[in-house]
Amino acid sequence: MPRRSPFLAWTKLVTRSLAPARQAKRLNPVLPALSRTRRPDVEGDWIAGVAMGAAGARRFRLYRPPGVGVLEKLPLLVMLHGCGQDASTFAASTRMNRIARQHRFLVLYPEQDRMSNVQGCWNWYDTRNGRARAEVALIVKAIEQVCLLYGVDRERIAVAGLSAGGSMAALLAAHEPGRFKAVIMHSGIPPGTASSAVSAVQAMRGHRGSAPLLAAPTETTARPPLLVIHGGRDDVVAPSNGQAAVRIWADAAGAKAGTRRIQQRGKRYPMAVTSFSRGRSLVATLVEVRGLAHAWSGGAKGQPFSDERGPDASRLTWAFAASRFAGVGSGR
């Protein structure tokens, strides 16, 4: 039997996710299972919460490293999962909590509601009827809730995501540029390049028919720097999407590309790194991972959408965010 194209399978997944109400009855038997979250095997607190807004309610999980002082203010990294994932599986795949314990920061994992998208995808593309903007507002609600309750340094917040979560992370940065010091998009699609599921499928292939959200240079002077990580063998979201995202960021800020550098650690996939700067200010960095398909680079072995053979995207993510946090923040 011929192997089914991953892109065709993904196209069907996105299309099916358009009508969550129609599939609500099919979801009922699995909802209890979805609600049973698995605690990551890392010392610290794994806190459950719910954020509410115009788009309904969204659960989230917060990882807090051990030994946080009462008056201590820690950086916050927001991690947005991809389709078919939840907070626990994304934490297990990325192993970001281990890095958070080592470097002492909080990790917030908002969770898409399966009634809003049957496949658990963030509706980053659904700008036509406002669902994308409503989900942005809900994620912001979760961030605000965590900031109020758990000692977050508001000057040191970054957002990252994989696939649909990466697209939503970029959309968050486009709508809330002053809230984040850095944005990381792994295997995602540039914001503003789709307005419906049909155009989202086309955008996944690399065909962009909509105007990007970052069109005006005057609106981008305070945009957080962007890190894009994308696999060269990604046949679900075309690698050209990663290239387009950094071009959108760079063009909007008038940034110039630097020298493309090839890096490799041991037997891991090599990566090509290109930075875009305006003067001495970093605007965007593109990391193209040769050999990587549609998966979190350097993720845990055996996890879905994870490839342990790539460079460690979690450490790249934190290093990028931490470099943006340098010199700011209140600490204790």
Image (cartoon, rainbow, N blue to C red):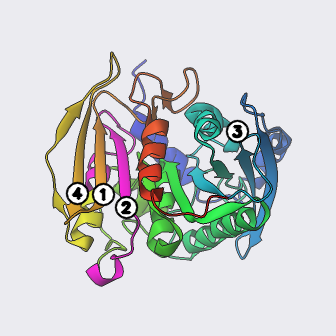
Q: Earlier in the sequence, mark 1 or mark 4?
A: 4
State left or right for residue 157 relative to residue 171.
right
Secondary structure beneath disc 4?
Answer: strand
**In terms of depth relative to the viewer, which is nearer, 243 or 56?**
243
Image coordinates of residue 219 in percent, x first then y, are: 35, 81
Q: Earlier in the sequence, mark 3 or mark 2?
A: 3
Q: Which residues are magenta?
A: 217-244
Q: Which mark is residue 284?
A: 1
Residues at marks 3 and 2, CA–CA distance in whole angstroms: 27 Å
Q: Mark 2 and mark 1 in contact? Answer it, CB < 8 Å.
A: yes
Q: Mark 2 and mark 4 in contact? Answer it, CB < 8 Å.
A: no
**In terms of depth relative to the viewer, which is nearer, 292 or 278?**
278
Q: What residue is shown with label 4? A: 276
Task: Look at the image and say whether residue 184 sits in the magenta stretch.
Answer: no
Residues at marks 3 and 1, CA–CA distance in whole angstroms: 29 Å
Q: Earlier in the sequence, mark 4 or mark 3?
A: 3
Q: What residue is shown with label 2? A: 225
Task: Look at the image and say whether residue 219 sits in the magenta stretch.
Answer: yes
Secondary structure beneath disc 3?
Answer: helix
Residue, x 42% and y 34% (percent of image)? 6
Residue type at mark 1 is Ala
Image: 177 above or below 247: below
Between disc 3 and disc 2, the foreground one is 2
Q: Mark 1 and mark 4 in contact? Answer it, CB < 8 Å.
A: yes
Q: What residue is shown with label 3? A: 88
